[in-house]
Image (spheres, rainbow, N blue to C red):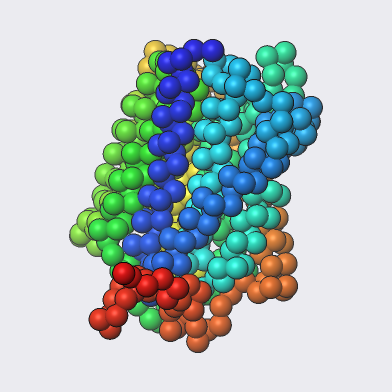
Amino acid sequence: MDTGDTAWVLASAALVLLMTPGLAFFYGGMTRAKSVLNMMMMSFAALAIVPVLWVLYGYSFAFSPGGNSLIGGTERLGFLNIGVDTAYGTIPEFVFAGFQLMFAIITVALISGAIADRAKFSGWLVFVVVWVTVVYFPVAHWVFDFGGSDGEGGGWIATKLEAVDFAGGTAVHINAGAAGLALALVLGKRTGWKRDPMRPHNLPFVLLGAGLLWFGWFGFNAGSALGANGLAGLAFVNTAVATAGAIVGWLAYEFVKEKKGTSLGAASGAVAGLVAITPAAGALSPFGSVILGLVAGVVCAAAVGLKWKLGFDDSLDVVGVHLVGGLIGTVLIGFLATTAPGGGAPVDGLFYGGNAELLGKQVLAAVVVMVFSFVLTYVIGKLIDMTIGFRIDPEDEVSGIDQVEHLESAYDYTGGSGGSPFKTGV
């Protein structure tokens, strides 16, 4: 085991953990003032629930030896058979397990933005438990598990299809985006959608959240090299320049359409670029990453308007940014991947003289994960809605989900305390 690699992956895991509170600010600022606490609590619920499941069985189902190409084995249930000297490549297995845990947390938290303002908190808690178990853990195995040093085991996308997904374009973003679309359809439109103004209540929160996400994303992408090496450096640079390119692309779209550039557009463009570069961070050159970012910024800016035309209420544009951005990043690897100096791909894409085989693999991986996640999420959401209920009453939605679901408000409008009624100051 290498101490430098270990230190880098530990630091990267902490950076990825920071992304979920960053997401809470990003999403929280985009909601109305009466919903911000509920929105942020949905992210913090993922922070509380997923680590417990990860220890009990999640890590085992995603990465344990003894399974098959669809699901991991049972040797790591309860983190059994892992010692402080057990290695995963050049790092301790505990470090790898901790790093991957952070991916599981933020993936389910991403979904929450699609159902802002209208989901019962109890329904969301049940959804987190079921979804990560039935959807995320198997998909993480497909994408991230490359099997043992003997070539045995591993997930089918990683080891059999051999599609390129450096840090989770399929397992995280396409997965969460498709799930967000499914839940938006299950819960239906917000009361007053298309009629009442539902503008972001705190744009500084949105920009702060985007900044924290960008900062943490360096651990997300560069940490996925699982070592302090040149591949991590390439992923780091690509993450920086693709995100910048996407901001430029999104703002350019706004200037062409509205003659103005917005702070919400800049923040959303940054996230779109981060999403798109995630699967490609270790396969593209920095020049290719800029091109990818520009494309993602423009296309995602256009895609967020689809909900108005198609009639689904994706509250905070999870579909337009994460599903579309994940598809762009995953599929364009088939064009922009390069083995030349400056890139890190296993094979060249079409623009660098490769054939269409890589593109076909990328499309297949993206479509399978998208369909799998959408179908299972729709079923899970429907079952929760038919049993304990998943949507709050329309009257409660209008009065404010924070007070109804948490007995709290984010802001003091009366001169009294906005905090928990169960605590008193001294």
**Total number of numbered labels?**
0
- Please determine whether, in this image, residue 294 is positioned above or below residue 386: above
- In the image, is 44 to the left or to the right of 135? left
Q: Residue placed at 28% from the left, 53% from the top?
A: 207
Classify residue 73 by image quadrant: top right
Can I make out residue 293 in this image?
no
Q: Position of residue 201 (x, y in %)?
A: 30, 69
Vertical side of 192 occupied by 203: above or below = above
* Image-quadrant location for residue 163: top right
* Depth order, front residue of 303/36: 36
Position of 201 with respect to 221 (left or right) is: left
Q: Residue at x 42, y 23 (%)?
A: 8
Q: Residue furthest front?
A: 426
Where's the N terminus, which quadrant? top right
Q: Position of residue 335 (x, y in %)?
A: 48, 29
Tell me the residue at 57%/71% (across/down): 120
- In this view, the residue in front, 185 or 18, is 18
Task: Pinpoint residue 218: horizontal percent, then vertical percent.
Answer: 38, 33
> Horizontally, is 423 left or right of 390 in the view?
left
Residue 409, visible in the rendered structure: yes
Q: Residue at x 41, y 45 (%)?
A: 19
Q: Left of 156 or right of it: where is 400?
A: left
**Quadrant of the rendering where the C terminus is positioned:** bottom left
Q: Is residue 172 above or below residue 341?
A: below
Residue 111: x and y in percent read: 53, 56
